[in-house]
Amino acid sequence: MKTYNIPIFVPHRGCPFDCVFCNQNRITGEQKEVTADDVREIISEYLKTLPKTNRKIEAAFFGGSFTGIPFEEQTSLLSAAYEFVQKGLIDGIRLSTRPDYIDKKILDNLMRYGVTTIELGVQSMDNGVLKASNRGHTSAQVIDAVRMIREYPFNLGLQMMTGLPGDTDEKSLYTADEIIKLKPDMVRIYPTLTIKDTFLEKMYTAGQYRPQTLDEAVSLSKKLLLKFEGNNITVIRVGLQSTDEISEGGSVVAGPVHSAFGELAESSIYYDIICAALKNTACKKAEVFVNPKEMSKAVGNKRANIIKIKNEKNIDIKIRADESLKKREVRCVCC
């Protein structure tokens, strides 16, 4: 069964703070406020393109802090989406919000209107990083919010960012360890991008902030991905969704932007696996077999893994498909 999200962007709605990295209008590409009628139209249009069977569909409110929107407006938007749940046309509703906008009244209302998944923008569990990023909440509030959410049957997602002001690889790995203790159902990993018209852009221009390089962000994201997966936590996204704004030449001023960032992290994992498999061989040429669905990751972006192994190990490899192999399982044969 395949899962589909119907994205409904509510840019900067409900956010009480201007986080240094945030300009939701540019990130989402949305400028206007969303109404209940917009919600109905968006869902109706998306449903025309989605399968009728063997699928799970959630209407997804992204882009702002949904539960910080005035209560009556929350209810209006939720009610419009819930009509489709009641008709059996979609299976639920998901939303993203802040840890400090969670309480029993809010959660009761989300249950009433068919919400199935809540994602919290945690970003960091280091209070110094949260303060430097002007998040306006603490790590303790994250823990409290998770505790309250876990009293309900919601699916829980936690989002973290790397490369924030004051952040280090060690602090990001600490954040991952603290998130693991909270046992979310899913996680997103977002390397920080410096977006136009944000305070972070001013910090960057003034030399007060150094963004991660692409290689640094990929290397760290790889470690985080393996850490979460090793603790049976699904990572549903690594890197922001590429759009006209979130792209090289768009609204990104600096930072590790790449249209296939998540695949770069996956490919880096495959590089390590392939090198380990070839380590004790005298091969100068080898065929490396992987699951067919994993071939692009094993090959790497623009054949990066093949080229790197040739340059660094002096081994010519060819990537072949083998349906009997599992994800990240490889078999090497010397030629």
Image (tube, helix red, strand yellow):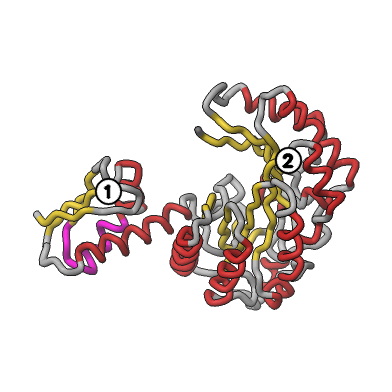
Image vertical order of residue 258 relative to residue 91, above or below: below
Nearer the camera: disc 2 or disc 1: 2
Q: Earlier in the sequence, mark 2 or mark 1?
A: 2
Question: Looking at this view, is 184 or 28 the one in front?
Answer: 184
Where residue 115 is drawn, which disc sits there? Answer: 2
Residue shown at the point (80%, 61%) measured from the top left: 100
Q: Is residue 179 visible?
A: yes
Question: Looking at this view, is 15 or 75 the one in front?
Answer: 75
Image vertical order of residue 28 relative to residue 286, above or below: above
**Horizontally, is 162 left or right of 230 in the view?**
right
Where residue 290 is drawn, which disc sits there? Answer: 1
Measured as percent of width and height from the top left, residue 77 is found at 81, 36
Q: Do the residues bearing badges 2 and 1 touch, measured as CB atoms within 8 Å?
A: no
- Three-letter code for the amino acid on which mark 2 is drawn: Val
**Horizontally, is 56 left or right of 289 in the view?**
right
Corner quadrant of residue 158: bottom right
Secondary structure under tag 2 reads strand
Measured as percent of width and height from the top left, residue 105 is found at 87, 50
How far is mark 2 from mark 1, CA to CA? 39 Å
Where residue 216 is drawn, which disc sits there? Answer: none
Q: Magenta residues, as a range?
A: 304-316
Mark 2: few, some, or many residues within 10 Å (few <14, many ≥20)?
Answer: many
**Horizontally, is 70 left or right of 27 in the view?**
right
Residue shown at the point (55%, 48%) measured from the top left: 242
